[in-house]
Amino acid sequence: MQSILDNADHSRLLTKTSLPGKSWLYEYIRWFSSQEDMGRRAINARYGEGTWEKEFMSFDTFRANATMPLQYVFADHHIVDVFIVDNETRKEITRLWFTALFCSRTTSILGIGLLPQYPCIESIQNALLHAIWPKTSHQQLGFTDDWLSFGIPLQLSLDNAWAHHSHSVEDLSRSISRNGQYNSIDLMFRPPYMGRYGALIERFFGNFSGKVKERLVGSIQSSSRNHIRNAAREAALLYEDIWSFIHEIVLEHQNTPRKELDYMTPNEKWLEGVEDFGLPQIPQLNDETERLFWRMSPETRQRREKGISFQGLHYWSPALAGVARVDRSGKPIEYSIRSDMDDISHIAIFKDGNWLGDVFAKELRQPDGSYKHVSEAQRKIYEELAISDGRPKSDWLKRVNETMDLNKRRTSEKKKAQNAAKRPSTKKPSPKDILASDAAIEGMV
């Protein structure tokens, strides 16, 4: 641009203008996209015949184009319109995010997840873990209806959230193939600001939201402040209640005939696909496979004398003694790390996609040989507390130990006091005590 401005013959042809506002720009794009004939002619003329159909129409024709189950699977997140309370005090309120995977061919819900965190890496990876293997979660809750769909998605449609572009999700989509024994997952990202591209799953979420408002106590009826305050005041449900309710709604969906399936149920449509293409091929669900669904660190680690350093902790196990530190050329070997964000006392190490074993944090080892369970969220909180106390950030573990020791001491004191209150007194009441008690009773009468 500067070269053009420096040329007097060119610069005199230009007129300085201001950029349009974003809201105006996106409004224009929506209008342009809705003018189908105009949009098709303009896009195809500029980028080649068929571009409009490929880029703008493909997401609207998934059900018609899909020829088999798992061919096109949509993933999305929805904040549940109800407040829940915590198990301990029944006072602290929060909301949950519901993640669902939707098979466009059969309209089946392939897998689900439920977390209190804003959609993150664990949201999509937990839902995938639930989706790929045959379902047992509804049976554990006492439901007897069928939920038949399972398998590795061939193509997974995601929005452009940061978590979906993570190294962890991308590596999982490749590693689940187990070196080509099974199909990998082709990740496909929906265009930004195009909600209609996820319309198939958005319709399910819309119906789900209506049933939440209709059936659950503490549900948020609208975005008005009064309704939100009333919902918070009435909150009484626990996480387990919402998890069970989601299963109830999904099972209703799976076993209800649908017009778009020629009045077949999603389960029946799934069985039809199985008859044509056979059962999906999936890897065995063992410890190694489960660890593929832990969060992968974008950075690799080397084995040192103290073990493997990660998040300020030193991890070791007897199995690590047989793991090489350098390769044949003398260069340090880099290992991939996957961690369970709910418990950082142990991590999994991988080399070339193969699980070598778990290693445990020396600093979290307790006298009885077990390890303190500390989540990644707790670690960050204790880091902030250490800084607020004027300590170095690395002193977060001391803060953990101090808090846990205080909790144990107070819990022990509480139990002793409760036991003492329950224990019958062996001391005989004095005549003075008896007279005082009789006088109190007469006063109450």
Image (cartoon, rainbow, N blue to C red):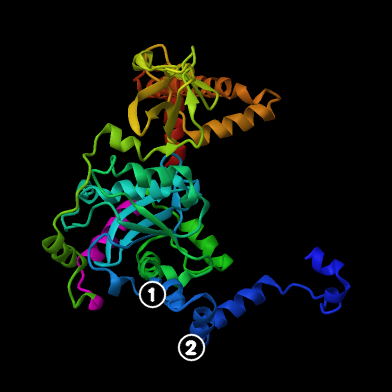
Q: Is residue 441 above or below residue 142?
A: above
Tell me which amino acid carries mark 2: Asp
Circle 2 or circle 1, nearest the eye: 2
Q: Residue at x 29, y 40 (%)?
A: 179
* Residue at position x 47%, y 70% in the image: 195
Give the percent coordinates (x, y) of residue 208.
36, 66
Q: Count neighbours of disc 1 (C-alpha within 10 A) and say few if under 14, some if 14 to 19, many if 20 or more.
A: some
Which region of the structure is painted magenta? 242-260
Frontmost residue, 249 versus 434: 249
What is the x, y in percent for residue 23? Answer: 65, 73
Sequence-first disc among 2 and 1: 2
235 in relation to 305, above or below: below
Residue lying at 52% horizontally and 51% vertically, measured from the top left = 162
Label 1 residue SS: helix
Residue in the foreground of this view, choosing between 10 and 54: 10
| Side (left or right) of 311 relative to 368 | right
Q: Is residue 314 left or right of residue 429?
A: right
Residue at screen point 52% across, 83% down: 39
Q: Amino acid at mark 1?
A: Asp
Residue 60's disc is 1
Magenta-drawn stretch contains 252: yes
Q: Which residue is mark 2?
A: 37
